[in-house]
Image: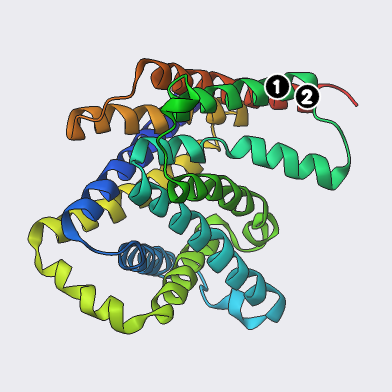
Amino acid sequence: MGRVKGLVMIISGAALWGLSGPMMEWTLENSGMSVSFLLTVRLLVAGLLLIAYLRLKGKQVMRPWRQKVWSRQMVIFGVAGMLGVQFAFTSAISESNAVLATLFQFLSPIYVILFVSIRQRFVPPFAQIAGMIVTLGGLFLLLTNGSLSGFSMTPAALFWGVAVGFAFTFYTLYPVRLMQEWGVLLSIGWAMVVGGAALFITNPLRLFREMQFLMDWQIAGMLTGIIFVGTLAFLLFLGSMKYITPIETSILSSFEPLTAMIVSVVWFGAMLGAWQLTGAIVMLLGVTGISVAGGKSKEDPA
């Protein structure tokens, strides 16, 4: 039963995260609000709710701030990790669409492999190299629709798409010790608050002016939905790791871009070209291959 529970949690969490992309795309397109305002509200509200929840459960939520070594790491994770990945992802949505942004985020295993390989000075297994080549081939088809003359992505969209991968890599690798010491929920909660506060102080007057968008019940309702869906997706994703293997988690995370693609087609009428759709499928297969190869290499005896 535990494994079944884990499978249901990861599929649900990945699907909800895939849904949050089109929700943010709709909000940005129909409100005129800035990426900064959307993320400030999302991060601060979600972070404070998580911390309040932990406080109600009796956790000493202020302890990480009593030691400089941990408070410094919390600030770095909040600004460069949490805010970095959220801002890059939402900016990629703003400059392109939810499908492309989610697929670019899905490239993060390649960045992780390259970073770890360079840092530890070893060559990745052939299966992982093959998976990266396949994934990049799929990305080429997605961006060009099979022809260089068909390349239509703006430089800004490409920049933020690539930035999503780098930011997600840092977000994945940096907070390991932080989460081991203080737990996942507390680390994430404070990182959200730090990231939201850092974004707010960059331009508080502009963000105060954008409070008017919350007077529109449709926009306010969608923002509430984004906060709820995104936070629930994250909790389901983390919870699933207690019951299923990392390989299964990586493979079933493919529901993120698939959900974003389906919702975008139904909601916005967005359609990918034949070669773009082929590229998206090839990317999913390539990343899945990387995950499986990585899992097998860990299981092999040294």
Q: Is residue 35 left or right of residue 181?
A: left
Residue 78 found in image quarter: bottom right
Amino acid found under the numbered disc labelled 1: Ala
In percent of width and height, residue 91 lies at 40, 54
Residue where numbered disc 1 is placed: 293
Question: Is disc 2 surrounded by few (<14), some (14 to 19) or many (20+) residues within 10 Å?
Answer: some
For the point 20% across and 74% down, the residue is 211
Helix, strand or loop status at disc 1: helix
Residue where numbered disc 2 is placed: 297
168 or 235, which is in the foreground? 168
- Estimate the spatial distance between the alpha carbons at disc 2 and disc 1, rounded to whole Å: 6 Å
The dot on residue 213 is: none
In percent of width and height, residue 70 lies at 67, 73
In percent of width and height, residue 107 lies at 56, 35
Q: Is residue 239 left or right of residue 24?
A: right
33 or 158, which is in the foreground? 158
Q: Quadrant of the N terminus?
A: top left
Q: Is residue 163 left or right of residue 52?
A: right
Question: Is disc 1 surrounded by few (<14), some (14 to 19) or many (20+) residues within 10 Å?
Answer: many
Residue 249 found in image quarter: top right
Residue 65 found in image quarter: bottom right
Do the CB atoms of the residues marked 2 and 1 lie less than 8 Å apart? yes
Query: Where is 237 relative to 209, above or below?
Result: above
In percent of width and height, residue 182 lies at 61, 63
299 or 59, which is in the foreground? 299
Asked if residue 254 shows in the view, the reply is no
For the point 34% across and 82% down, the residue is 204
Mark count: 2
Amino acid found under the numbered disc labelled 2: Ser
